[in-house]
Every structure is written in C-alpha cells, then in structure tokens.
Amino acid sequence: MKKLAILGSTGSIGNSTLSICESFPDRYQVVSLAAGQNVEIAFAQCERWRPKVISLATEELAGQLQGRLKAAGITGIEVVHGTAGTVRVATLPEVDFVVSAIVGVAGLEATYAAVCAGKTIGLANKECLVAAGELIIAAAKEHNVALLPIDSEHNAVHQAMRGGTPAEVKQIWLTASGGPFRNTPLADFEHITPAQALKHPTWVMGQRITIDSATMMNKGFEVIEACRLFDLPPAQVRVTIHPQSTVHSLVEFVDGSILAQISVTDMRLPILYALAYPERVAVTEKEALTFDLTTLSQLDFSQPDLTRFPCLRLAYEAAAAGGKAPIALNAADEIAVAAFLNPDPGRSIPFMGIPRTIEDVLIETSGPRPATIQQVLEADLAARECACEVIARQFTGGLRNRHK
C-alpha cells in the first residue's frame, strides 16, 4: 500500500490521481492533500478521503474549511495553510509518494522539501524543473530519490528509455499537438482571442497550460524539463508536431532504432505508470485506458514553425543560456498569460504580446545560476516584476519599435 500526498489535489492531475485511487483502493491510500483555493472541492475531498492533513492557500480559506468540517461533524483532519502548510503535506513521515501537480513555482518549495525528505516524486509540475532543475536533480541524487515524470511526453520517454541505456540514446522526440492554431494564418495571430486559445483540440487542462499549449511555450518548458530529467543537451531534445496526439514521445537510439510510446490521451495512464513503477498494473475495461489499434489509420508528423510559435524558440534559447534565463522564461510567461486572459480590454495584451513580453524580460535578465531555492524564488520575483513593467510599457507606447 503506497501512501500518497497530492499537491494540487483540486486540479485536473489531482482529480485524475484520486480517480486512480478509487480504482485501486488496495494499492493507494490518500494521506495528505494540498488543495489551493477551492474550499468547496477541498471539503468534498475531505468527506471522501479523510486525509490526515489538508492545506489551503491562505489562513482565511483554511478557516472556512475548518468551519465546514466542524459543521459536518468531520474530525481528525489537520487544516494548515500557505507554503508551510504545503511543505507539511509533502513531508509527513507516513507519506511514501508525493504527486507534485501545483501549477507554477507555488509548489517548488514543497517539492524540494519532499525530495530532501526522501519521498518518491511523481512530477507533473514542469515549472519546478524549469526554474530549479539543477537543485532538484542534485537533491534527488543525494537522497536517492526517484523523480518519475507524469507529464505524458516525459512519461513516454521514461517508458521508451527502458529499452536501452542512457549512453545508447541519440536523441528524444517530444510530440506536440500544435494546439488550435497550427494551421491559422500568421497574419491572424494578433487577433486571436482568449476564448479561441482556450479551445484545445485534444486535452482538457487548466487555463494557463491550455494557453501555453496554444503558444507552444508548454512544449518549450518540456524541452527544458527533458534536458534535466534525462541529462541531455537541448540539441538532443527535438519537437515534432503530431496532431493526433497518439504517439506521446519517441526515443531514437544510436543504432537507428526508434521506440515510440502509444496510448489513449488520458492522464490517468501516466499517473498510474508513475505510481506503480517499476511495476505495471493491469487495467480493466472499467478504467477505459486500453488503446484501440484501429484508430491508427493516420499518423502525421511535421516540424514546428518557430516564426508561428516564437515561444518555443525562446525556450530553446533560455535552455542554452542557462543561469537565470529559464526562471525568467517561466515567470514572464505566467505574467504574460494572465495579462492576455485579463477580461478588462484596457489591461489585456494580444496573443502575440505573450512572446514579445517574454523576449523583453529575457533580454533584461542576467546573472549566474541560483545556488539555493531562496535565490530561485528571488530571481522568479524579479522576473515577474520585470514582466509587469514590460507589459505596462505596452500600454504606454514604450515598447520597442520592432514590436509594433
């Protein structure tokens, strides 16, 4: 019986993980949850799972949940809050496995603390490795901790790499659906609306990751994550557009062999793989995770257009630059995406304002690689402030002429 902490329990990955726990109650037990800001869902999860500890984003929200639990007569659940609360959720002594699924750097400190506490990590938060990959990888090696990717692409690479040794890998290929705009004329990109960008053709995800998929920044983050997880330079991590999203990634070996991982587009499968590793757990028709081979009538692959998707180019440049560049890339993107989604038309930026903002922030970012998590967080905050200044210049006409 593996005992789980789920960071980001109210999000899509968290809910999918709980679905796996429902299907395999003899294998997985929920011990602690970090639920963010959704008190209603957090209360429902407490009713169903009775965790020992649950964390909310703020003291006020924690108080609201405590009141709901008391009114319902539910006792024995410790309610905590903030970063310290999330760290507690991740480092409880009885926890064996931590699912890190909080979007952004909000889950960074808890994930790092869990690694240092010797917990196995199921990593769905790519921003942790983008911003602090060197520190997390070094800590994992020091504490003999397995980092098991839950992102479908990295999970696929992990599976395919079981067919050879790291020294036998020539390169890996991360597949990308291309999002909703892979065939949209470039001239129309300035006029893309949030409603259009939030309609992903394949996956159902949160708002930020859906926009990141539309700009292909999500794939850029995955390139950086893959470099760190699999100890490869950016030149050996390739991206290919695959609109069917059937092949989740490929590994090319030095002898010319290519191994591909194919499965249904359901995040429960990579989650189950990570939870069960190194075993494979048999699924039934009830789980609906088996693949219908008759759907493989057409598989398309093409090279991404970096003019259409400059965010992917910026990610490769940040990966090559190192230092604070990947931190700034992630921080600037989060601020820019929020500005694009701002419902106030007077304070929102256009779709292509996202890469323009990120590029300006990267130009203004310099300095050595942070040596501590605190330094990572300081660099992240500085990049966010810079991004806000860059966006403000867009409203006051101070952006460079090359961006007009």
Image (tube, grey):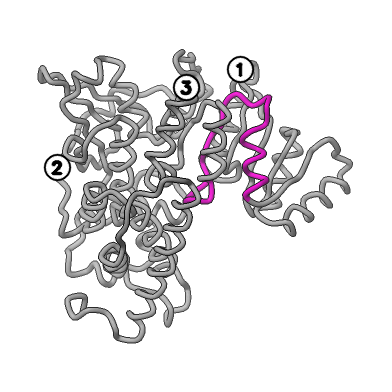
Disc with the residue nearer the chain's start (3 vs 2): 3
Q: Amino acid at mark 3?
A: Asn
Q: Which residues are magenta?
A: 83-107
Q: CA distance from mark 3 to mark 1?
A: 23 Å
Q: CA distance from mark 2 to mark 1?
A: 41 Å
Identify which residue is drawn at 57% across, 39% down: 15
Is residue 225 in the magenta section? no
Q: Which label sits on residue 144?
A: 3
According to the picture, the residue beneath numbered tag 2 turns out to be 302
Residue 281 in picture, x, y percent from top left? 49, 15
Q: Quadrant of residue 25?
A: top right
Residue 121 in picture, x, y percent from top left? 50, 30
Q: CA distance from mark 3 to mark 2?
A: 39 Å
Is residue 87 in the magenta section? yes
Identify which residue is drawn at 53% across, 39% down: 111
According to the picture, the residue beneath numbered tag 1 turns out to be 27
| 142 or 55: nearer the viewer | 142
